[in-house]
Amino acid sequence: MYQIGDYVIKFNNGVCRVEDIMHLDMPGTDRNRLYYLLIPKDCQSAKVYVPVDAESRSLRKALSKEEAWEIIRKIPETEKKWSTNDKQREQEYKAAIQSCNPTELVGIIKNLYSRKQIRRAQGKKSTSTDERYFKLAEDSLYSELAFAIGREKQEMKQIIAKTIAEIQEKTEG
């Protein structure tokens, strides 16, 4: 169980602070059920309620500074095999995004960066699906890393992009 003041990751809301643990007095809710009141870091005016008994499915603890740097250090060795079937791969991306697992997000970013380079070399643009999942993975990963490390999101994007570009150059060279 999380405590008031803890930072957690919630799909679609990113980094959130546990503001309260309470019973909801709202129509349609079980008044005996405990809920976390979450405040998203990027939208302080929003309130998100998550049942305490559903935390394992929808929340996870935010990365520590050390864990965030470890994710970055392991980027070169982070590999994931994605389906070659476009529809199946999209479902895999969707599941990975919803999991909010930073290693999965790195895998998406690396794969889509590589696909973008290959398509560009063929004189083609990235597909809209690739662009959408690339942006979702970037936003989610960079926000959490920036929060954990205490840097700006744009700086995290530059660090990750540089690391992936260096990996790409080594594999091509």
Image: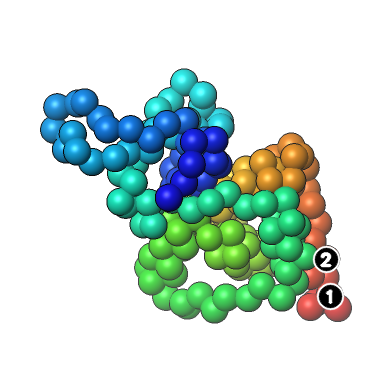
Q: CA distance from mark 1 to mark 2?
A: 6 Å
SS state under label 2: helix
Q: Is residue 120 visible?
A: no
Residue 49's disc is: none
Q: Is residue 167 visible?
A: yes
The answer to which image quadrant residue 21 occupies is top left
* Outermost top residue: 45
Marker count (numbered): 2
Residue 108 to residue 44: above or below: below
Q: Is residue 31 left or right of residue 75?
A: left
- Residue at 33% from the left image edge and 32% from the top image edge: 22
- Residue at 54% from the left image edge and 78% from the top image edge: 81
Q: Which residue was labeled with disc 2? A: 166
Of 3 and 73, the residue lying toward us: 3
The quarter of the picture where the C terminus appears is: bottom right
Dot 2 alpha-carbon crowd within 10 angstroms: few under 14, some 14 to 19, many 20 or more: few
Q: Which residue was labeled with disc 1? A: 170
- Residue at 21% from the left image edge and 26% from the top image edge: 25
Query: Where is residue 154 shown, x and y percent of the image?
Result: 73, 40
Of 93 and 4, the residue lying toward us: 4
| Callout 1 amino acid | Lys
Q: Is residue 146 left or right of residue 93?
A: right
Dot 1 alpha-carbon crowd within 10 angstroms: few under 14, some 14 to 19, many 20 or more: few
Query: Where is residue 9 shown, x and y percent of the image?
Result: 51, 47
Query: Where is residue 98 shown, x and y percent of the image?
Result: 43, 55
| Callout 2 amino acid | Glu
Asked if marks 1 and 2 touch (Cβ < 8 Å), the reply is yes
State how the image is colored: rainbow
SS state under label 1: helix
- Residue at 41% from the left image edge and 62% from the top image edge: 95
* Outermost left residue: 28
